[in-house]
Image (cartoon, rainbow, N blue to C red):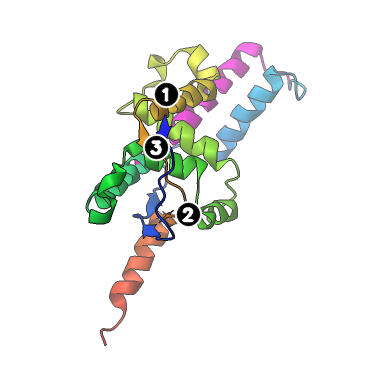
């Protein structure tokens, strides 16, 4: 559980940027759409197009696995960022008393997200970003590498969102940690290509 929020006045510290890398997955948008349609047909939300129920179940599980795998890679980026935040804040003498834990930054990202990060995610079309980041963290708290499809039960794949939500709550509760908010801690969000281009432009600027 988080400790009470620490009063840090009006000082704002800048955290390392969160950089998200593209997925190196061979899943076409058409396949993802078909898998989503299978889930809707199985639940009766849209009419069955004549596909056998067993095939619909197979597509559903395939789609769930692809979703979970992509979330896992988001979580790798998030955990890399959490580690960078923990290390960088530990080097600031005036923050010695805060005793940061990784959970502090996980909670900041998911529950106390800076306004600029929210706005950028919205521009990217990511609305339920809290669920994405929390489930990505939950998966990475349990798995060191993305699990193979045959190592996950059909029950887990069908309801992975429920299990990863529980894993995230367990992760937050596993270590007492100070509560920090966007009032004192700020960071930016970048796609990896965007961040690389920004650095190249900075390096190309002539020295004065």
Q: Given this view, does label 2 or label 1 mark the residue nearer the observer?
A: 2
Identify the image quadrant of the C terminus: bottom left
| Label 2 crowd bin: few (<14), some (14–19), many (20+), radius 10 Å | some
Task: Tell me the chief SS of the magenta region.
Answer: helix
Which tag is nearer the camera, tag 1 or tag 3?
Answer: 1
For the N terminus, which image quadrant?
top left
Q: Is residue 56 magenta?
A: yes
Residue 92 in view of the camera: no
Report which residue position mark 1 lands on. Answer: 170
Label 3 Cα crowd, 10 Å radius (few <14 / some 14-19 / many 20+): many
Which residue is nearer to you in this view: 48 or 200? 200
Please tell me in which quadrant of the rendered image residue 203 appears. bottom left
- Asked which secondary structure carries label 3, the reply is helix
Q: Residue at x 31, y 48 (%)?
A: 85
Mark 2 residue element: loop
Q: Is residue 198 magenta?
A: no
Residue 75 drawn at (x, y percent) = 39, 37
Residue 118 in the image: x percent, y percent? 55, 52
x, y (%) of residue 171?
39, 27
What mark, if any, has residue 75 been given in the picture? 3
In whole angstroms, how far apart are the C-alphas of marks 3 and 2?
A: 24 Å
Which region shows up in magenta?
A: 49-76
Q: CA distance from mark 2 to mark 1?
A: 26 Å
Residue at (42% x, 41% y) in the render: 179
């Amino acid at each position: 559980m988080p400790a009470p929020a620490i009063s840090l006045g009006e000082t704002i510290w800048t955290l390392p940027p969160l950089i998200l890398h593209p997925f190196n997955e061979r899943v076409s948008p058409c396949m993802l759409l078909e898998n989503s349609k299978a889930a809707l047909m199985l639940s009766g939300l849209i009419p069955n197009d004549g596909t056998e129920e067993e095939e619909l179940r197979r597509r559903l599980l395939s789609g769930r696995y692809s979703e979970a795998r992509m979330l896992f890679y988001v979580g790798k980026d998030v955990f890399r960022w959490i580690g960078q935040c923990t290390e960088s804040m530990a080097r600031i003498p005036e923050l010695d008393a805060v005793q940061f834990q990784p959970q502090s930054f996980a909670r900041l990202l998911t529950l106390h997200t800076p306004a600029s990060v929210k706005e950028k995610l919205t521009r990217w079309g990511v609305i339920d970003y809290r669920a994405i980041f929390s489930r990505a963290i939950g998966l990475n708290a349990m798995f060191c590498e993305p699990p193979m499809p045959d190592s996950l039960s059909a029950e887990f794949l069908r309801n992975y969102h429920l299990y990863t939500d529980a894993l995230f709550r367990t992760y937050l509760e596993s270590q007492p940690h100070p509560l920090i908010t966007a009032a004192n801690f700020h960071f930016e969000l970048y796609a990896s290509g965007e961040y690389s281009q920004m650095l190249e432009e900075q390096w190309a600027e002539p020295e004065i």
